[in-house]
Image (cartoon, helix red, strand yellow):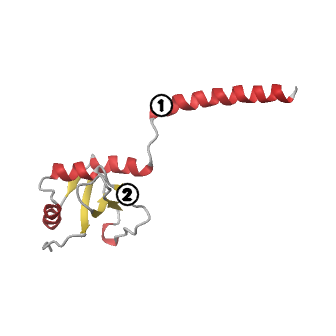
Amino acid sequence: MTFRQRLKFYLVGFGMGMLVLIMIINKRGCKGISTQKMEELTFQKWDISDAMRCKLNCLGFSADSLFLKDVKTCKVNYSADATNASLKPCSNYVLESTAKSAATYTLLVADCDNTSKLLDIIVKTNCSCK
């Protein structure tokens, strides 16, 4: 077998493999870890305390629906330290707003089985909430 024949044989196999891969990716889709986690969090029930509602009002989110719509544009920061010993069975995440968001904020969220608990909101503007 000459070099040209081997190259042709290789390219035909490579091309068929790429076609199969493209068909698989088009059916299932390809999403990043951050996108998958945000979809999971947005479809859960949110537990928001009165103090957190006050901070949300300072940000301009008077209704939960406005907040949940804006949370969908956030990114999960896996490198930030989100450990909280008091909520051991839950996973804690730091969500940061993006340029698409209505306001600039950072959220600390506890992801429990079917609920997401809003633990803290860090805002750059002064807010009189405690």
Q: Classify 2 as above or below 31.
A: above
Residue 76 disc label: 2
Q: Classify 70 as above or below 84.
A: above
Residue 129 at x, y percent in the picture: 13, 72
Between 77 and 86, the residue placed more toward the observer is: 77
Q: Is residue 13 left or right of residue 26?
A: right
Q: Circle 1 sits in a helix, a strand or a loop, which is it?
A: helix
Q: Amino acid at mark 2?
A: Val
Residue 96 at x, y percent in the picture: 33, 60
The span from disc 2 to disc 1 (Cα, nearest Å) is 25 Å
Q: Circle 2 sits in a helix, a strand or a loop, which is it?
A: strand
Q: Which residue carries the number 1 mark?
A: 26
Q: Classify 100 as above or below 50.
A: above
Q: Is residue 6 left or right of residue 108?
A: right
Quadrant where the N terminus is found in the figure: top right
Between 118 and 55, the residue placed more toward the observer is: 55
